[in-house]
Image (tube, grey):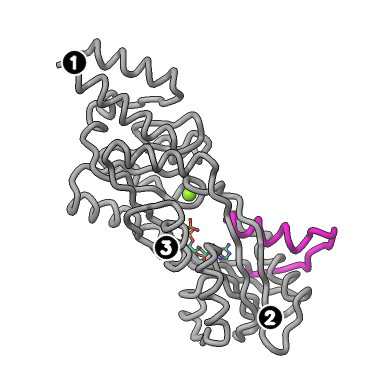
Amino acid sequence: ATPTSIMVGTGRGAELGVLFRRGEALQLLKDAKVVAVDKTGTLTEGRPVLTDLDVAEGFERDSLLAKVGAVESKSEHPIARAIVAAATENGQSLPSLTDFESVTGMGVRALVEGSLVEVGADRFMRQLGLDLKVFAQTAERLGQEGKSPLYAAINGQLAGIIAVADPIKTSTPGAIAALHQLGLKVAMITGDNAKTAHAIARQLGIDEVIAEVMPEGKVNAVRRLKATYGQIAFVGDGINDAPALAEADVGLAIGTGTDIAVESADVVLMSGNLQGVPDAIALSKATIGNIH
Ligand code: ADP
Ligand code: MG
């Protein structure tokens, strides 16, 4: 491609809300075979809501929700905001807590009114030595519904199962269809539960799912996709996505995402949604493909 065609393409991109931070990205995108996409905040709104809460025998719903809400009030995870919102929706104030701790990719814990309260993924509970089988059927159903199951433990005893659901952005299905139209495969990379991830992928026609990935595992997932398919574009919005954005042949950040994601990306999608990705690839094919 000539410097002029790159300039023209970059200018056209800006009109479409696709900001090329690196000119090379415009040349590379046309050769992408797979678009790997972060789930939360990229495919979905990133604003989950609490949809279900079942308690184990001997526990009471409102008091459990208050304790869990207290712990989550110290966390910045989108899941935490959903739980705090539910726990305070009727104006309740949350109990006080001490010794808050966040376990990356797992969950959170704190002391609330003398009780140790732990909330997080199934793998977090298993690490704590808890048996989740009383909630196995519930978890199965929640996953099939595309909801993310979480668990709460009080003083080392399984106390409840909580589900959050994160709505899919209205722009997502069209963007995935456009990527397929351009002959690309779409892969999802997520820290979320495998059942939930597969249910959402099925609903969206996503070709491949890599789920239950720890934050530092997203880079490895991108490496594996590169080894299997060749050129990989990765799309993400979160702090966790920054290394994967850098590792991909082309990293595309959702413009409304975190600063670190934007700074690690080659391309920034100002629209704040996935439609910028097929737009950018089509632009790359049009500009670089035609002018040599
Ligand atoms: P993701 O971006 O996919 O949520 P994370 O690595 O941030 O990936 O989290 C992985 C999993 O750990 C979450 O899906 C959730 O099950 C659990 N988790 C993380 N933070 C919290 C939290 N504050 N409260 C409850 N669960 C959490
Ligand atoms: Mg995200």
| Residue pointed to by mark 3 | 198
Is residue 96 found inside the magenta-colored segment of the image?
A: yes
Q: Quadrant of the C terminus?
A: top left
Query: Residue flagged by tag 2: what amino acid is it?
Result: Val
Among numbered discs 2 and 3, the one appearing first in the sequence: 2
Marks 1 and 2 in Cβ contact (< 8 Å): no
Among numbered discs 3 and 1, the one appearing first in the sequence: 3
35 relative to 241 in the view: left or right: left
Cβ of mark 1 under 8 A from ligand 2: no
Label 3, label 1: how far apart the Cα atoms are: 41 Å
SS for dot 2: strand
Residue bounds of the magenta highlight: 76-99
| Residue pointed to by mark 1 | 291
SS for dot 3: helix
Q: Give residue 55's mark.
A: 2
Q: Nearer the viewer, mark 2 or mark 3?
A: 3
Q: Residue at x 45, y 39 (%)?
A: 174
SS for dot 1: loop
Compared to residue 215, the image places residue 233 above or below, namely: above
Corner quadrant of residue 26: top left
Q: Residue at x 56, y 46 (%)?
A: 45
134 relative to 219 in the view: left or right: right
Query: Residue flagged by tag 3: what amino acid is it?
Result: His
Label 2, label 3: how far apart the Cα atoms are: 26 Å
Residue 135: give x, y in percent of width and height. Answer: 57, 82
Residue 50: give x, y in percent of width and height. Answer: 66, 62
Residue 226: give x, y in percent of width and height. Answer: 21, 49
Q: Residue at x 44, y 18 (%)?
A: 15
Among numbered discs 1 and 2, the one appearing first in the sequence: 2
217 relative to 140 in the view: left or right: left
